[in-house]
């Protein structure tokens, strides 16, 4: 992060010096490219922020791939992916996620906030703050303490201190609250241009801000107990009301504009569906099996057992790994699962909890265009007699299924312990990792501030 900032500053100084030394004898207009943007605008900043947010921060293998392998939705069958199945994750593997997010999406989001302030554009400012909050949330949820209050000072402070996760969470909520205020402003002179998520519809961004506030309140259930549930519930009532509201990024068919998992499978092809997940889907006779996975060469759906390196198992399917499969940042389906969990944990009637659970499953089927009324009727009957902890386990298991290859799977599992996933290798003293190591760049260039003695089985603050 800081090395890249320094390089940018050095290059800028070099460019200015070169220009000043040559301006006396070269016509300053001779090398102007009429097709090149001469001024950074909100329209050019926002697409870059959103693309990084979707491709790296929410949809990239550097964040979801490791988690999906650890929770056995996928399995690494060769190379570095196989080491992840064996709970090895190196600091060099998280650099693009950590350093790249600071130097790309977050830096651009701060620039967009400044520009929107200058142009008196509250809606653009609100969107930028939401994107910034998402980046902070995704990073702190896997790295714990991260730089924020002293970050982005460039050469004035190339080694920023690390803030506690507790402080970062307060900042996430602050940013989202301010975004709601900005997006509620009735006067917007410019409009949200270049918006890949909602095509400039600020009312949908408002719903997304409330949805995200609910998510980050719910993450604190181990810390804040009932208050966390109540805070989250208050936001859910102002969040999404259908699948049409989902905050999702749609990709194109081109080789360099396609879904990140699709590109990973095209270039590396060393992950397969996890046996634990495939067996679970088969046990439920789940209609999503056919979109979550592709059949193997025998036209069967099979999974790879961790450590087996089974490259003949099914590959990830059209829901997550086709060229134009979307990245889901936060969805109506997640909203419904949050609501059902809150209702259960705050003592609501269990039949009402089941109604919301069934609605969540139904909307998930519809989301992937595999709605099956007969199957849903059978599923409704199968959970009719579930009570207490068995009902809660079923609720979280269904969330695990419905949010396949989304970061929230990992966060929900760490909070609740469901579903109960056997660690790999079975029978050994193994523990599923609960966080990421810090990036190698930070360990070298900001080593005096990076928390020391961290292992990937240590817990982040909200997971303790």
Image (spheres, helix red, strand yellow):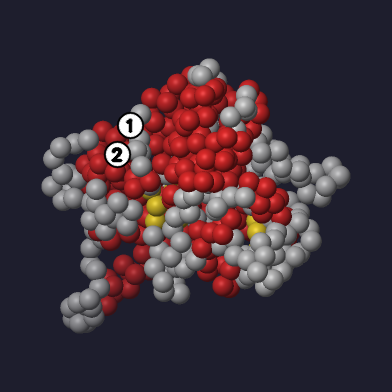
Ranked by sequence position, the earlier of labels 2 and 1 is 2
Residues 350 and 266: in front is 350
Whether label 2 touches label 1, CB < 8 Å: yes
Q: Secondary structure at mark 2?
A: helix
Residue depicted at x 36% and y 42%: 242
Closer mark to the observer between disc 2 and disc 1 = 1
Numbered label attached to residue 206: 2
In the image, residue 255 sits, relative to residue 74, either above or below, namely: below
Neighbor class of circle 2 (other Cα within 10 Å; few <14, some 14-19, many 20+) is: many
Q: Secondary structure at mark 1?
A: loop
In the image, residue 420 sits, relative to residue 42, either above or below, namely: above
x then y, percent, for residue 450: 61, 43
Residue depicted at x 71% and y 55%: 275
x then y, percent, for residue 343: 49, 24
Residues 115 and 314: in front is 314
Numbered label attached to residue 268: none
Q: Which residue is mark 1?
A: 238
285 sits to left or right of 235: right
Residue depicted at x 56% and y 62%: 317
x then y, percent, for residue 356: 47, 32
Give the tally of numbered discs.
2
- Mark pair 2, 1: CA separation: 9 Å
Residues 383 and 392: in front is 383
In the image, residue 452 sits, relative to residue 269, either above or below, namely: above
In the image, residue 199 sits, relative to residue 30, either above or below, namely: above
Residue depicted at x 23% and y 67%: 38
Neighbor class of circle 1 (other Cα within 10 Å; few <14, some 14-19, many 20+) is: some
Q: Quadrant of residue 29?
A: bottom left
323 sits to left or right of 36: right
Q: From the image, which quarter does the C terminus lie in?
A: top right
455 sits to left or right of 132: right
169 sits to left or right of 454: left
């Amino acid at each position: 992060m800081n090395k890249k900032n320094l390089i940018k500053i050095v290059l800028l100084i070099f460019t200015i010096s070169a220009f000043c030394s040559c301006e006396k004898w070269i016509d300053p207009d001779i090398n102007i490219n009429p097709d090149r943007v001469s001024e950074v605008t909100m329209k050019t900043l926002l697409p870059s922020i959103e693309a990084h947010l979707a491709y790296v921060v929410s949809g990239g293998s550097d964040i979801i791939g490791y988690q999906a392998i650890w929770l056995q939705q996928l399995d690494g069958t060769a190379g570095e992916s196989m080491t992840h199945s064996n709970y090895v994750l190196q600091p060099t593997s998280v650099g693009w996620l950590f350093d790249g997010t600071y130097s790309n999406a977050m830096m651009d989001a701060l620039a967009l906030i400044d520009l929107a302030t200058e142009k008196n554009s509250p809606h653009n400012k609100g969107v930028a703050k939401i994107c910034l909050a998402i980046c902070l949330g995704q990073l702190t949820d896997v790295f714990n303490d991260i730089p924020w209050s002293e970050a982005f000072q460039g050469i004035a402070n190339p080694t920023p201190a690390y803030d506690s996760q507790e402080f970062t969470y307060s900042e996430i909520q602050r940013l989202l609250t301010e975004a709601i205020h900005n997006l509620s402003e009735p006067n917007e002179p410019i409009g949200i241009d270049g918006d890949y998520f909602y095509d400039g519809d600020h009312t949908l961004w408002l719903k997304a801000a409330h949805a995200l506030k609910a998510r980050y309140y719910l993450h604190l259930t181990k810390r804040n107990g009932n208050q966390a549930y109540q805070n989250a519930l208050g936001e859910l009532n102002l969040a999404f009301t259908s699948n049409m509201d989902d905050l999702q990024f749609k990709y194109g068919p081109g080789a360099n504009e396609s879904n990140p998992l699709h590109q990973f499978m095209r270039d590396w092809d060393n992950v397969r569906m996890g046996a634990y997940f495939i067996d679970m889907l088969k046990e439920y006779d789940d209609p999503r099996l056919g979109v979550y996975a592709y059949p193997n060469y025998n036209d069967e759906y099979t999974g790879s057992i961790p450590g087996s390196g089974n490259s003949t198992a099914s590959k990830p399917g059209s829901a997550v790994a086709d060229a134009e499969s979307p990245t889901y940042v936060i969805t109506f389906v997640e909203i419904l699962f949050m609501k059902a969990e809150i209702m259960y944990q705050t003592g609501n009637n269990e039949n009402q909890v089941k109604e919301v659970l069934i609605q969540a499953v139904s909307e998930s089927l519809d989301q992937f265009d595999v709605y099956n009324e007969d199957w849903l009727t059978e599923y409704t009957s199968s959970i009719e007699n579930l009570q207490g902890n068995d009902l809660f386990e079923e609720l979280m298991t269904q969330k695990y299924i419905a949010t396949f290859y989304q970061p929230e799977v990992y966060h929900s599992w760490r909070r609740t312990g469901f579903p109960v996933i056997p660690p790999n290798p079975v029978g050994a003293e193994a523990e599923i990792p609960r966080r990421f190591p810090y990036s190698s760049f930070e360990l070298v260039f900001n080593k005096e501030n990076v928390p020391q003695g961290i292992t990937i089985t240590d817990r982040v603050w909200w997971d303790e």
